[in-house]
Image: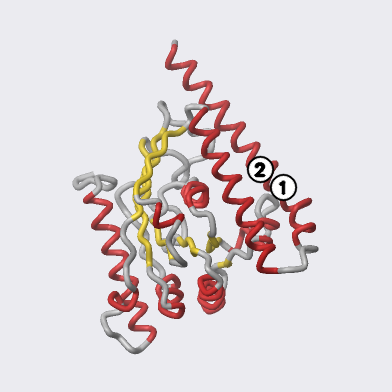
Amino acid sequence: MTARLDYLWRFCATGMAFVVFGVCGVLFSVLVFPLAWLWPHRASRQRAVTGVIHWFFRALVALLRSAGVMKLEVSGSDALRAGGPSVVVANHPTYLDVMVLLSLTPRACCVVKNAHWSNPCFWGIVRAAQYVSNADPAALIEAGARQLAAGYTVIIFPEGTRSPARNRLHAFSRGFAHMALKAGAPIVPVLMDCDPPAFMTQMRWYHVPARAFRMRVNVLAPLGVEQLAAHQTIPALAARSVTSAVEAHITQHLFAYGFFKTGN
């Protein structure tokens, strides 16, 4: 009986959290976005908007934790808070990953799907925060490099969508590598895990697991992009080397940290 009540409570709390997120997203787009564009100084406007987003997601994560919906274990997050501009590259098991990373990163710019630019919950947020669309690879690289030059940490999921399975990744796209090489920025690999699985591919918000899910975030040491390029001078070959090295590095550490398990 206690387990059943706990499940019902987490089901209701999860639904309410999504309602809060959706309503706040719409209000931000309808109210805050138009006001933000009246702000005369573009750089300070972006800082203010990204700060609001960071604190909103910190509050939402705290709400989910206090409600008993999720547990969160984080290590190495100082690199996200105190480090300089970098390209954060993470695997993507759930659609809560971006929420957690934004809650940990005060000055963040995200690479987002082009569909979010017309989504009623997101369109104002992504524009006001000057997030980067993944619609055009060349524009993505240029926009990401500009954000890095402005002092922002760029968060990207190079799989392009949520991972296909718990122990498998989609092949990484090379946009993050071109971006890091163009800006000369380090790459910070981040390992994400969710146990039991929740909000993964083909799962809906109401597919609440039998117990509170635990999200684990491990921020690894930054990687120098020039070393990863293996002394390649041709940009396309350098980006290929960086992408392969980072994908192998993340996959190796997902197994080493027990996020991936052999034989499953």
Q: Is residue 60 left or right of residue 48?
A: left
In the rendering, at what x and y percent does residue 100 appear? Answer: 48, 47
The answer to which image quadrant residue 118 occupies is bottom right
Pick the residue in front: 22 or 224. Answer: 224
Check residue 251 in the rendering and tell me which mark sits there, or answer none.
Answer: none
Pick the residue in front: 177 or 1. Answer: 177
Which residue shows up at 33% across the image and 83% down it? Answer: 237
Residue most extreme to the bottom: 233
- Marks 2 and 1: in contact by CB < 8 Å? yes
Pick the residue in front: 134 or 38. Answer: 38
The image quadrant where one finds the N terminus is top left
Residue most extreme to the front: 82
In the rendering, at what x and y percent does residue 19 appear? Answer: 65, 36
Which residue shows up at 68% across the image and 57% down it? Answer: 123
Question: In the image, what residue type sits under mark 2?
Answer: Gly
Question: In the image, what residue type sits under mark 1?
Answer: Val
Label 2: element kind: helix
Estimate how packed mark 2 is, as few (under 14), some (14 to 19) or many (20 or more) residues with alpha carbons within 10 Å. Answer: some
Check residue 26 in the rendering and tell me which mark sits there, or answer none.
Answer: 1
Q: Is the residue 6 above or below the residue 228 in the image?
A: above
Q: What residue would you read off at disc 2?
A: 22
Number of numbered discs on residues: 2
Estimate how packed mark 1 is, as few (under 14), some (14 to 19) or many (20 or more) residues with alpha carbons within 10 Å. Answer: many
Q: Is the residue 105 above or below the residue 216 in the image?
A: below
Label 1: element kind: helix
